[in-house]
């Protein structure tokens, strides 16, 4: 396996877990197939006696598959599409992508969307989570210039989904801001709130009759921390703890604007559901003494976006710590921009359900107050973040298999925000070779879903849907084509980009058919 640096989380995994080095490898990490239905044995003793649940998915539970425009469509400059920040950033800095590739062609879904829909049908999902490329329908981001071929493309996809009997869950923004808007300040310019609202309204008008579920924004943390904090994602700006938090504020206001437009102008005729998609790792206290530190980290990661929406305003601990550190750094006011009372009201309650993207877990230890110096989200949170070196790794270092983290995160969502319906809008695992006999992926999904079901049965968590990431191997952002998460394989040297089923696609089809993770549910 090629060793890759961590761009997504930028956490320094600074402590190994030597105690676990001599763990029992009675199944062996590489013999994935042998025991997934019986035991976790994920290389972590914490979970070694875990037994996959034989309880079924609840009645009405929905299964889906997800993609995002820039990762699959290609056709980056075709038929009048405008440039968006990932096109521009990668073309200007090709070295930001690990394998030197880009999304110019990707898996060519702009021309091959019927192949994608054939995969969805074959697996039997009830819904497809896809995203609209803002610049494909509004090349400069503003409603003054509308691109008809771009609109036709999404209408064709949505109509084909309808014909296939598959519901559409559409994300309005999956990281691909029109470059023209970035040139005007992007997510740190307050004007973005109304511009996003205008774009959202246009999408509801054009596509709303075909869309059952809308996601306003995908993963605000990656947009703001990745894009403006650590500069690891487009637009690649390095302004940790400053522009990063401005971005957080305007992303939330833009989401709220789009949610309210739907709620006020379209809900009564279109009857869809709409929410924001928040990604979160689970942060597990290393010891009982680290519980407060772990909760602080949760508030800095999920709470920063979840609290203003599902409750009100930024979380208190986040406000307090950033204000305290800003003052010591000599700022005249907190680096975390305050919401006005009106803005707090405007953002609060703008959800129909909780949408969660979840992949991995970190351990947390309390630490001394980090030195005052360069601001950053990590220093603002002020805790030590690490992973056990016994946890199995996916295609990239930070991405460890920790199935029990998924169950704990669901329980935390319920205890933190209350009894709200939750959909998993992304979960999945990558490898680097795209093997067709992907037993490790089957094992990953089985264990993650099983822990999720435990939270449903043991804690009455209202989990209503699961979306696997992703249909087919595709452009994995700065990993290029090296991080392969599809349940279908695509040979990137094949001009036809044929979608080839992996073993996991048959497995997922069976779970959907039976509603069960084991041979027979009780
Ligand atoms: C993103 C996807 C990405 C996936 C796997 C999520 O954060 O929404 O676009 O491909 O993670 O890394």
Image (cartoon, rainbow, N blue to C red):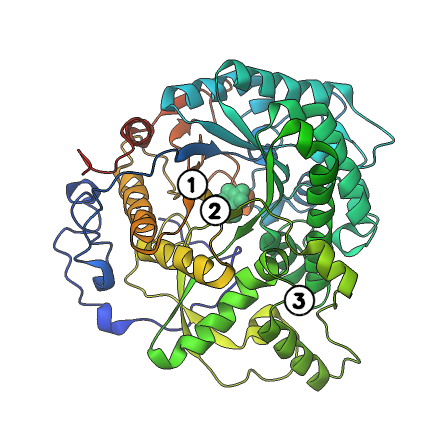
Which residue does the numbered mark 3 point to in the structure image? 240
Q: Which x, y percent locates residue 73?
A: 59, 28
Tell me if 204 is positioned left or right of 358 in this view: right
Q: Which x, y percent locates residue 354?
A: 52, 48
Which residue does the numbered mark 2 point to in the structure image? 421
Quadrant (top left/top right/bottom left/bottom right) for the C terminus: top left
Neighbour tally class for label 1: few under 14, some 14-19, many 20 plus, Cα within 10 Å: some
Which residue does the numbered mark 1 point to in the structure image? 464
Q: CA distance from mark 3 to mark 2?
A: 33 Å
Q: Give 243 or 95, whichever is nearer the viewer.
A: 243
For label 3, being within 8 Å of ligand 1 is answered: no
Q: CA distance from mark 1 to mark 3?
A: 36 Å
Q: Which x, y percent locates residue 96?
A: 60, 49
* Residue located at (72% from left, 67% from top): 242
Vertical placement of residue 455 versus 167, above or below: below
* Mark 1 residue element: strand
Q: Residue furthest front?
A: 268
Residue 198 position by quadrant: top right
Q: Which x, y percent locates residue 186?
A: 77, 50
């Amino acid at each position: 396996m090629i060793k890759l640096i961590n761009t997504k989380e930028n956490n320094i995994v600074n402590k190994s877990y030597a105690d676990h080095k001599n763990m029992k490898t009675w199944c062996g990490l590489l013999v994935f197939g042998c025991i997934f239905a019986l035991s976790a044995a994920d290389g972590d003793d914490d979970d070694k006696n875990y037994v996959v649940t034989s309880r079924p998915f609840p009645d009405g539970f929905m299964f889906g598959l997800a993609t995002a425009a820039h990762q699959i469509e290609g056709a980056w400059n075709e038929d009048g599409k405008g440039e968006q920040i990932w096109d521009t950033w990668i073309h200007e800095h090709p070295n930001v992508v690990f394998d030197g590739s880009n999304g110019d062609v990707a898996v060519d879904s702009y021309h091959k969307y019927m192949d994608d829909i054939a995969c969805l049908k074959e697996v039997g999902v009830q819904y497809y989570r896809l995203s609209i490329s803002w610049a494909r329908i509004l090349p400069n981001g503003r409603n003054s210039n509308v691109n008809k071929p771009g609109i036709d493309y999404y209408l064709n996809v949505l109509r084909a989904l309808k014909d296939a009997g598959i519901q559409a869950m559409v994300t309005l923004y999956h990281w691909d801001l029109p470059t023209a808007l970035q040139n005007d300040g992007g997510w740190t310019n307050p004007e973005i709130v109304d511009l996003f609202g205008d774009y959202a309204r246009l999408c509801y008008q054009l596509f709303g009759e075909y869309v059952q579920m809308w996601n306003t924004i995908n993963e605000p943390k990656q947009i703001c921390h990745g894009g403006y904090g650590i500069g690891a994602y487009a637009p690649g700006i390095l302004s940790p703890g400053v522009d990063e938090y401005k971005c957080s504020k305007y992303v939330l206001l833009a989401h709220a604007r789009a949610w309210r437009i739907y709620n006020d102008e379209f809900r009564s005729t279109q009857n869809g559901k709409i929410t924001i998609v928040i990604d979160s790792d689970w942060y597990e206290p290393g010891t009982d003494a680290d519980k407060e530190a772990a909760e602080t980290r949760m508030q800095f990661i999920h709470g920063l976006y979840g609290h203003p929406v599902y409750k009100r305003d930024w979380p208190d601990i986040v406000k307090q710590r950033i204000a305290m550190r800003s003052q010591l750094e000599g700022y005249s006011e907190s680096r975390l921009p305050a919401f006005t009372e009106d803005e707090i009201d405007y953002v609060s309650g703008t959800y129909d359900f909780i949408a969660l993207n979840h992949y991995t877990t970190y351990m947390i230890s309390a630490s001394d107050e980090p030195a005052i110096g360069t601001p950053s989200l990590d220093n603002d949170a002020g805790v030590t973040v690490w992973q056990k070196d016994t946890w199995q790794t996916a295609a990239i270092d930070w991405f460890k298999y920790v199935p029990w983290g998924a169950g704990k995160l669901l329980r935390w969502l319920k205890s933190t925000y209350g009894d709200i319906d939750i959909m998993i809008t992304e979960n999945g695992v990558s490898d680097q070779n795209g093997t067709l006999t992907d037993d490790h992926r089957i094992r990953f999904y089985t264990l993650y879903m099983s822990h999720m079901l435990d939270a449903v049965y043991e804690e009455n968590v209202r989990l209503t849907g699961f979306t696997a990431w992703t249909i087919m191997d595709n452009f994995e952002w700065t990993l290029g084509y090296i991080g392969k998460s599809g349940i279908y394989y695509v040979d990137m040297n094949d001009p036809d980009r044929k979608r080839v089923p992996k073993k996991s696609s048959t497995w997922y089809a069976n779970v959907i058919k039976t509603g069960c993770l084991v041979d027979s549910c009780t």
